[in-house]
Each structure stands twice: as structure tokens, then as C-alpha cells.
Amino acid sequence: MLVLGRNIGETIVIDDNIYITIFETSTTGNKFKIAIDAPKEMKISRAELYENDPERWPKIQAMKEESERRSKKAMKADAARRANAEQANRIIREARAIQAAQAQRAEP
């Protein structure tokens, strides 16, 4: 599975004739809309229409589970980055406070 990050207005091109464009996201950021431009003879369906298809549904479920796993992993990594950034900012503030205190003591 190839996972690509896209911003609103950006497009993914598949095989030079399929274009997938992100054009809207929800305010909460957990839903988005896409536009698909593909040849008319190409069938495009929502995955839930295959729930009763014993051949396709297991693959769809596996992809969904992988997507959820990657999302959870990304959320954990994001939380760790934020925690590290907060810790770094705290250390910088403390160092600046120490420097300011040293500068005040050094003034005649």
C-alpha cells in the first residue's frame, strides 16, 4: 500500500489517465472529499458496497486495518514530537532565565 500525504487542491495521478484531487476537508480534519477524474469505462465504487463480496471484502478490511494502524502510529509520533518540542522550549526558557540572572549579577 502506498500512502501519500496531500493538501487541499493537490492531485495524485495514476497511470497518466486517473486524477485524484483533495478538494475539501472537515473542520475537525478527520474527513475529506476527493474528486476522481478517470476514463468512463473504469468502474469506481465505495468500498462498503463490497461487504458481501467474499473475494474483495477481506482485502478492503485489511487495508482499512492497516490505515488505522498507520494513523495511530502517526498520532503517537506526533504526540511525541509535541512533547519533545515542549520540553525543548522549557529548557530554552530556563537557559534564558539563567542568562538574564547572570547578566543582572554581572552589571556594576
Image (cartoon, grey):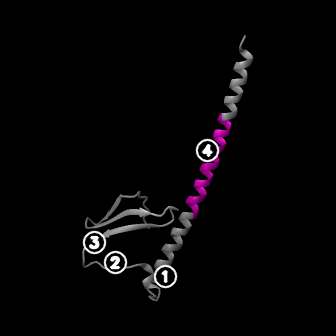
Quarter holding the N terminus? bottom left
Residue 108 magenta-highlighted:
no
According to the picture, the residue beneath numbered tag 2 turns out to be 44
Q: Secondary structure at mark 4?
A: helix
80 left or right, relative to 42: right
Q: Position of residue 106 (x, y in %)?
A: 72, 15
Q: Say which amino acid is labelled 1.
A: Pro
Q: Which mark is residue 58?
A: 1
Disc number lying in front (2 or 1): 2
Q: Is residue 86 above or below residue 59?
A: above
The Cα–Cα distance between marks 4 and 2, rounded to whole angstroms, is 43 Å
Q: Along the polypeptide, which appears first: circle 3 or circle 1?
A: 3
Q: Along the polypeptide, which appears first: circle 2 or circle 3?
A: 3
Q: Say which amino acid is labelled 3.
A: Ala
The Cα–Cα distance between marks 1 and 4, rounded to whole angstroms, is 40 Å
According to the picture, the residue beneath numbered tag 3 turns out to be 38
**The residue stretch that appears in magenta:** 72-92
The Cα–Cα distance between marks 2 and 3, rounded to whole angstroms, is 9 Å
The Cα–Cα distance between marks 4 and 3, rounded to whole angstroms, is 43 Å
Which residue is depicted at the point 73% across and 24% down? 101
Q: Position of residue 77 (x, y in %)?
A: 59, 55
According to the picture, the residue beneath numbered tag 4 turns out to be 85
Q: Secondary structure at mark 2?
A: loop
Q: Main secondary structure of the magenta part?
A: helix
> Dividing the picture into quarters, in which one does residue 56 lie?
bottom left
Q: Secondary structure at mark 3?
A: loop
Quarter holding the C terminus? top right
Q: Is residue 60 above or below residue 103?
A: below
